[in-house]
């Protein structure tokens, strides 16, 4: 999966209407815990979410540094962003907006 060259405007959040985590049976606290055990539970919810790619893209583009988004922890997103930076530097191609 790549997040480069995404053309949807960052403010387009229509995907949120399909977010599994908006369901009444999902505890939102799962997504904002520092516990890796709890984060894994949130990631399992994301695994079944139909909009996890859009969610991850949003979190990366907005540089969201808290919570589980798109099946990733903040630490995982930092790693993804660093890889994106390295790729951009090597290829000089499209990139995530600042
Ligand atoms: S991928 Fe996870 S955090 Fe993102 S909308 Fe779906 S359930 Fe929520």
Image (cartoon, rainbow, N blue to C red):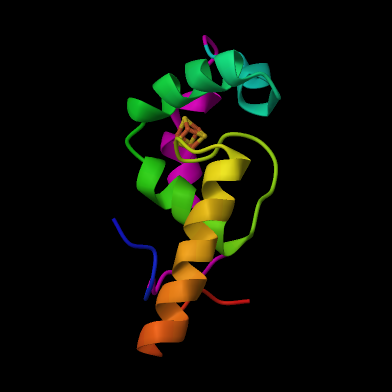
Q: Is residue 82 magenta?
A: no
Q: How many marks?
A: 0
Q: Examine the image and state in which quarter residue 10 appears.
A: bottom right
Residue closer to the observer: 97 or 78: 78
Image quarter of the C terminus: bottom right
Q: Is residue 12 visible?
A: no
Q: Residue at x 46, y 49 (%)?
A: 56
Left or right relative to 57: residue 28: right
Q: Residue at x 33, y 25 (%)?
A: 48
Rendered location of residue 68, percent (x, y): 57, 34
Q: Is residue 59 above or below residue 2?
A: above
Which range is magenta? 6-25
Residue closer to the observer: 81 or 31: 81
Q: Is residue 67 above or below residue 27?
A: below
Q: Is residue 21 above or below residue 91?
A: above
Q: Is residue 16 above or below residue 6?
A: above
Q: Examine the image and state in which quarter residue 1 appears.
A: bottom left
Q: Residue at x 64, y 58 (%)?
A: 63
Q: Examine the image and state in which quarter residue 35 appears.
A: top right
Residue closer to the observer: 11 or 58: 58
Rendered location of residue 93, percent (x, y): 37, 87
Magenta span: chief secondary structure? loop
Rendered location of residue 94, percent (x, y): 40, 83
Rendered location of residue 40, percent (x, y): 50, 20
Q: Residue at x 69, y 27 (%)?
A: 32
Residue closer to the observer: 61 or 89: 89
């Amino acid at each position: 999966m790549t997040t480069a060259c995404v053309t949807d405007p960052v403010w387009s959040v229509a995907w949120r209407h399909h977010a599994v985590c908006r369901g009444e049976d999902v505890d939102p606290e799962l997504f904002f815990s520092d516990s890796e055990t709890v984060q894994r539970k949130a990631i399992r919810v994301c695994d079944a979410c139909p909009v996890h790619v859009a969610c991850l893209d949003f979190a990366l583009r907005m540089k969201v540094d808290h919570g589980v988004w798109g099946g990733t922890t903040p630490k995982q997103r930092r790693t993804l962003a660093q890889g994106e930076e390295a790729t951009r530097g090597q290829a000089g191609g499209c990139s995530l907006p600042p």
